[in-house]
Image (spheres, rainbow, N blue to C red):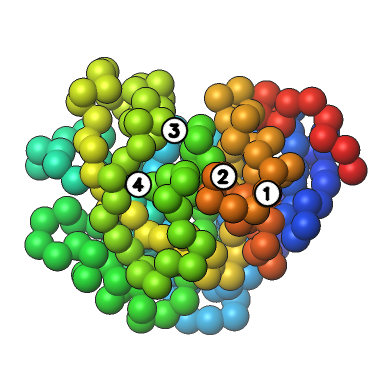
Amino acid sequence: MTSRTEQPVRRRTVDRLEVAVYADRATTGRAAGTAAADALRRALAAQAQVRIMFAAAPSQLEMLRTLRTAPGIDWARVAVFHMDEYLGLPPGASQTFGRFVTDELVGAVHPGEVHLIAPDGDPVRQYTDLLAQAPLDVVCLGIGDNGHLAFNDPPDADFADREPVRVVELSEDSRVQQVGDGCFARLDDVPRRAITVTIPTLMSGRRLVGTAPGASKRAAVARTLTGPIDASCPASILRRHADCTLYVDTAAYGEDRGA
């Protein structure tokens, strides 16, 4: 079962990465959410449980709102994960990524399993153990304004990281983005450390659905599509995945970048 959605204004392939460009943010999000729903339905038709991982960011809102209303998904057989979490926020803080995933998806669809990163205890080991139990079937990701994936920031992102999950120091660019996204009022309020899944963990997903709308993403999208595949733009690694589609709007795509 495949849902209908608006047609992109442009499609292209860069190395192995499929790119779909839509006229505006809303249409982009609907297309990405439809693609994620299709991926879930296909996986559920083939296996008893499906594992899906989400980015937690304002860029994902339209995608998530489409996905949570998509028909034909047996959420009771879906296990939900997310990519990263701040360290150092007070308990119950509204900015936690676990709360974002709960508010924007989990509370609406009630998955069979929900695995949120808990900053207390030994979260790296706990999440590593959970991820080791079975492969990720679908990964719904975004691209940071600086080209990061999850909180794997340039130039420190490691494409061959041996650890599935780690604690990282956030770059100033990533912290500034959180203020620009409206998540924090001041830069000083943004935590300096976080837990993130690593690049190999993200790339291990069988199907990747990327959503990167808005003019703030334009430089990162350009580097992703036209620059070298290296840690100066972590998202460039998406060009090596066997089944990844990046959904962007014209504001993020910018000028025509050739065939």
- Residue at 53% in and 51% down: 231
Foreground: disc 1 or disc 4:
1
Indicate whether 174 appears above or below 106. Answer: above
**Which SS class for mark 1?**
loop
Marker disc for residue 101: 4
- N-terminal of the pair, mark 3 or mark 4, is 3
> Looking at the image, which residue sits at the far right?
259
Q: Which of the two residues, 35 or 239, is positioned nearer the viewer here?
A: 239
Amino acid under disc 1: Pro
**Which SS class for mark 3?**
helix
> How many residues crowd mark 1 within 10 Å: few (<14), some (14–19), many (20+)?
few
Foreground: disc 2 or disc 4:
2
- N-terminal of the pair, mark 1 or mark 4, is 4
How far apart marks 1 and 3 lie (CA) works out to 27 Å
Task: Provide residue 107's location: percent of width, then percent of height.
Answer: 32, 48
- N-terminal of the pair, mark 1 or mark 3, is 3
Pointers 2 and 4 in contact (C-beta within 8 Å): no
**Which SS class for mark 2?**
loop
Pointers 2 and 1 in contact (C-beta within 8 Å): yes
- Residue at 23% in and 38% down: 192
Q: How many marks?
A: 4
Marker disc for residue 58: 3
Amino acid under disc 2: Cys
What residue does disc 1 label? 228
Confirm whether residue 177 shows in the render: yes
